[in-house]
Amino acid sequence: MLPIRPALLALALILPLPVYAQGANVAFGASRDSSGPVEVTADNLSVNQSDGTALYTGNVIIGQGDMRLAAPRVLVVFAEDNSKIDRLEATGGVTLVSGEDAAEAERADYDIDGGTIDMAGNVLLTQGPSAVTSERMRVDLDAGTAQMSGRVKTILQDGDQ
C-alpha cells in the first residue's frame, strides 16, 4: 500500500467539491408577473378539441411580457374546462430569452399557473460573457431565478473582455 501524501490528500478533499456539484442557483431575467397574456405565432396550427390541445409547428415563437421562447414544435395543453392555458411543451431545440439572459435546451415545459419553466437536455445559459451548462434548469419567472442541476459547469468571464 502506498502512503498518502498530505498535499495529495488536501488536494483530493478540495477538488471534488466544484467538480461534482449537483446544482447551482442563478439569476434569470427580471422577476415578472407570469399571469400576463401569452402570444403564440407559428407556421401551422392543429387543434384537438377532444383532448384540449393545440399543436403549433414551424418557427414557433411564444411571448409573454419581455420573455420569448422559440422552438420548432410547441404543444399547448388547455385546462379541463378549456378556459385557459395550463402548460406549454416545447421540443426540438428551444431558445428562451428574458432581458439580457438567454437559455437553450432540447425541450422546455412551461407551467403557466406555477410560473415555472423546466428546461432539459444540454442546457446552456448565457448571461453576458459568462455561461453555465447543465442537464436541467428550472426557471422561476416570478422570482427571476433559476436552479440548474445535472453536471453543472460554469465559465465566468469579466465583462470587460
Image: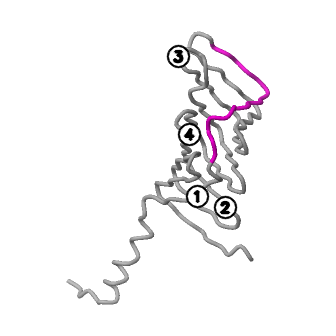
Q: Which residue in the structure is indicated by mark 2?
A: 127
> Disc 2 on helix, strand or loop?
strand
Say left or right for 8 vs 113: left
Vertical arrangement, residue 66 with respect to residue 38, above or below: below
Mark 1 and mark 2: span between their CA atoms?
A: 9 Å
Which portion, as a residue range, is magenta?
A: 32-48
Vertical arrangement, residue 9 with respect to residue 132, above or below: below
Q: Residues within 10 Å of mark 1 (few under 14, many from 20)?
A: some
Q: Which residue in the structure is indicated by mark 1?
A: 27
Q: Residues within 10 Å of mark 4 (few under 14, many from 20)?
A: some
Say whether disc 4 or disc 2 marks the residue closer to the N-terminus.
Answer: 4
- Which is closer to the viewer, label 2 or label 3? 3
Going 69% across and 50% down the picture, which residue do you hit? 98
Mark 4 and mark 3: span between their CA atoms?
A: 19 Å
Q: Quadrant of residue 40?
A: top right
Which numbered dot is residue 80? 3
Amino acid marked by disc 3: Glu
> Disc 4 on helix, strand or loop?
loop
